[in-house]
Amino acid sequence: MAKKITVIPSVSESLHTQMKPRIRVCGYARVSTASMAQADSYAAQVGYYTEKIQSNPLWEFAGVYADEGITGTKAKGRYDFNEMIAACEDGDIDLILTKSITRFARNTVDCIQTIRKLKAIGVGITFEKENINTLEEKSELLLTIMASVAQGESEDFSGNNRWAVISRFEKGTFIVGTPAYGYRKDEDGNLMIEEKEAEVVRLIFESYLNGTGTYLISKMLNEQNIPTIRESEQWQDSVIKEILKNPVYEGDALRQRTYTEKQFPFVRRGNTGQMPMYLTRDAHPAIVTHEEAEAVRSIMEYRSRTLHMGGEKCQNRYLFSSRIICGECGSHFRRQKIYIGKPYEKIIWTCHRHVEDKESCQMKAIREDMLQQAFITMWNKLYTNQGTVLEPLLKALTGLAANQPDTEEMEQLDREINSLSEQSRILNQVMMKGYMDSALFMEKNNLLAHRLTECRRKKTLLARKQKRTKEIVGTEQLIGLLKKEGYQREFNEELFDLTVKEIRISLTHEITFCLHNGLSLTEEEGGDADAVAYTNRV
């Protein structure tokens, strides 16, 4: 008697015919250094994932995201990685292929958080080396253990490197990787003067000792078209300050001016006494004398103490700092004083680009007292007209957030997700009791998993569409502030800070206040037009 054979179709075939045409798959590759060997590995990984995804008829190629020469200990700076996560959130990717957990992330917390975030919207990650798919129930424990191991390996590696570097500091055998501006390395790694750049360094020190500030020095170098450090676009006053403070130019080698934290994510910080430093006097040829360097430090200390210049938070020490934006070129305004010492001394705010090049931006300066008066006028108009501006706005925002069709669709998706989750739980119980063939279980379980993925993706996109809570809350807070503070006769710094996110100035000096709730209100410089006419939703 002939045996009866029943063909059970593959899971991929079933999905192809019953669900959607193809799964959108991308690859992710990363190497942590920019060496030639790693560059070959980087290119090989990109080529491997491109070929693998495109050769699978059930997959739709969603690209290869790859970060070269970047550490995996933190997500910041991994541009392709962050772009890939954004594409997943936008619903453009269903599955990510990557070599291993160590390629994806060496930080346990970041790794698990990212995986859970993607899993919540139905995006899976396949780690080929560990043979783990994050959409499977058993993946969570394995991933936590393996990510912790990867982080431990990274911490050990970092600790060993740190010990080796400090040992070379103590022995005086440390060789710098990239020499400071004004120097080059000989064949043995010793610092030698690069005379063309050294002339620029001497000019910087001489100018500062003659009373020229760091901003004017940087402006002078840019006007003379002197090549910048590391081929940057232009000289900055922060770079000039760093050159003036660096003891390397007086021939001294000061090691560990910065340090890397021992804990994840290995943040690099300036050493202000947290770690020991290692100073070697006259370690290499000097560009300036010790006396010149000491004189510069004395001037810097005096200016910092008496004029409050050069502090770490200098650029944001004023209320309007980093908040005024030029409507002509997009640059920020900077604070200046005019008629200093005169009875009519004034504070003005000027476009940064206009100060550097009047031809590239025609924006004129605006007085600080005019900005303050414009805010008072705007506030009082808003207070008077809140019934015709803010209350209708709040009502409209609330109505959009509570849109009935969207709400019903969200509730339907919640019910479907709960139903599919319950089906998956029952299916697992049936399988555990031996009432179902394993091949049939795999087929049905994968179908349920993909239906769950689709529902979660739809829910995520719908929630993003409905997300207006920030604007609603901001508008409610603004109404509360208006009722509490009432009509204003003088400029209130705290009230301004709580209300205004940024200020945009037009060429005709129309002052637009962009509020924290997304509302924009425009005032003419010294004008008194109706606030309702200038209201605009951002």
Image (spheres, helix red, strand yellow):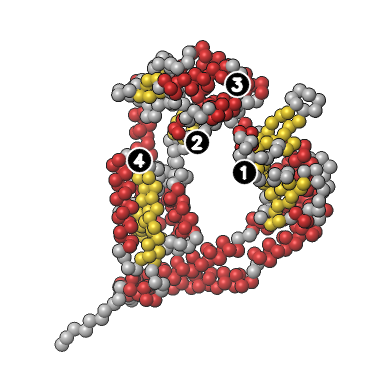
Asked if residue 103 shows in the view, the reply is yes
- Outermost residue, front side: 359
Secondary structure state at the residue bearing disc 4: loop
Which is closer to the viewer, label 4 or label 2?
Answer: 2
Label 4: how many Cα within 10 Å (few below 14, some 14–19, many 20+): few
Looking at the image, tell me whether mark 3 or mark 1 is earlier in sequence order: 3
Label 1 belongs to which residue?
329
Q: At label 3, which amino acid type do we have?
A: Thr
Between discs 4 and 2, the one toward the N terminus: 4
What separation in Å lies between label 1 and label 4 (alpha carbons)? 36 Å
Q: Nearer the viewer, mark 1 or mark 4?
A: 1
Residues tagged 4 and 2 counted as in contact (Cβ below 8 A): no
Element carrying mark 1: loop
Q: Is residue 425 visible?
A: no
Quadrant of the rendered image containing residue 238: top right
Within 10 Å of the Cα at label 3, are there few (<14), some (14-19), or many (20+) other Cα atoms?
few
- The residue located at (47%, 45%) in the rendering is 76
